Image (spheres, helix red, strand yellow):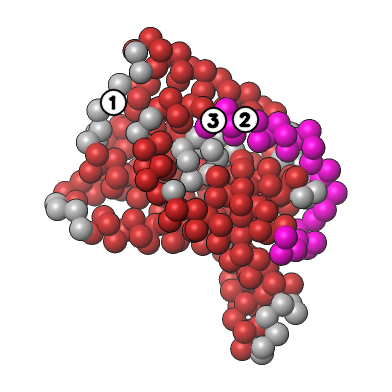
Amino acid sequence: MTLIQSILLGIIQGLTEFLPISSSAHLVITPYLLGWEIPEDSAFIFNVLVQLGTLAAVIAYFWRDLVTILKAFLLGIMRRQPFTEENSRLGWLLILATLPAVLAGMLVKDLVEQAFSSPIATAIFLIVTAGFLIIAERLGKRTRHLEQLGWLDALVIGLFQALSLFPGISRSGSTITGGMLRGFDRKASTRFSFLMSVPVMLGAGGLAVLDLLQLPDFTSQLPTLFLGFFAAMIVGYLSIRWLLSYLTRHSFYGFAVYCLAAAVITLVVALIRGG
C-alpha cells in the first residue's frame, strides 16, 4: 500500500465510520473503483489500524461520558445495586446491545468474509442501508430521549447492529434506525449508537490485533499504514462532532440518497467490467 492510498483510505474510514454510509463498504468499493491492487496482508493490517483509529476518535470525543458510565457501572456492582443509578444502568444496556453482534459474528463469520470480497454484494447492502434510513425517517416518532432507554430498546438496537457485520450495511445507520423505530429522536439514537460502538470496536480490534501479531514482517508496513490510522482518528473525531450538530436541523434522507448513488455507480462499474 502506498502513502497516498493509506492517507486517502484513512480519511474515508474516518468520514464513513460514523456517518450512516458504511465504512466497510467504502473500504471495499474505493480500491475496486480506483483499480488499486492492494495485497491481502496489507489490506488486513490497514483495516485493523484504521478501526483502532476511529475507536480512538470515539473515545476521545465521549471520554467524559465513558468515564462516568464506567464509574457508575463499577460502583453499582460493588454496592449490589447495578440498575439503580442511571449511568450504571446505561452501562448494562450497552453490554446488552452488544451481545447480538457478538453472537451473529460467530454464526455468520464465513458469510461475512465472502461478502467483503464482493463489491456487488457490498453495493446491494448499501441499498439496504438507504432503505433503513428512509424507514427511520418515515416511521420513527422521535419523541423519546436517551434517559428513557430500556432493555427491550437496547436489544432491538443491538439486533440492528448485528446486521451491520456485512459490508455495506452501515453500523451507525442500522443502529440509529433501530433507535428511531423505538421512538427515540435523532440525536439520542445517534448518541447511543456512538457509545455502543466502543465495546464492539474494542472486541473486534482486540481480536484483529492478535491476528495481526501472527503475520510475518508486519512491522515493515507500519510506518506507512500508521498515517492511515492518524487520518482516520482525526477525521473520525471531526465527523462525530459534525454529525451530532447536523442532526439537530436535518434528516437522514441526504445520506440515503448518497448510499443509493454509491451503490448504483458500483453496480454499473461491475457490469461494465463483467463482475
Where is residue 179 drawn, in percent x and y? 71, 49
Residue at the (67%, 75%) spot, across then down:
88
Secondary structure beneath dot 3 equals helix
Mark number, residue 126: 3
Q: Which residues are magenta?
A: 125-152
Most distant residue in the top direction: 272
Where is residue 255 drawn, in percent x and y? 63, 30
> The C terminus is located in which quarter?
top left
Mark number, residue 130: 2
Say whether residue 54 is left or right of residue 258: left
Say whether residue 57 is left or right of residue 33: right
Q: Earlier in the sequence, mark 2 or mark 1?
A: 1
Mark number, residue 196: none
Q: Nearer the viewer, mark 1 or mark 3?
A: 3
Q: CA distance from mark 2 to mark 1?
A: 26 Å
Q: Residues within 10 Å of mark 2 (few under 14, many from 20)?
A: many
Write down the residue under mark 1.
Answer: 36
Residue at the (66%, 58%) spot, across then down:
155
Most distant residue in the bottom direction: 79
Q: Amino acid at mark 2?
A: Ala
Q: Residues within 10 Å of mark 3 (few under 14, many from 20)?
A: many
Q: Amino acid at mark 1?
A: Trp
Mark 3 and 2 residues: CB-CB less than 8 Å, in contact?
Answer: yes
Most distant residue in the front direction: 107
* Residue 132 among magenta residues: yes
- Magenta part mainly helix, strand or loop? helix
Secondary structure beneath dot 2 equals helix
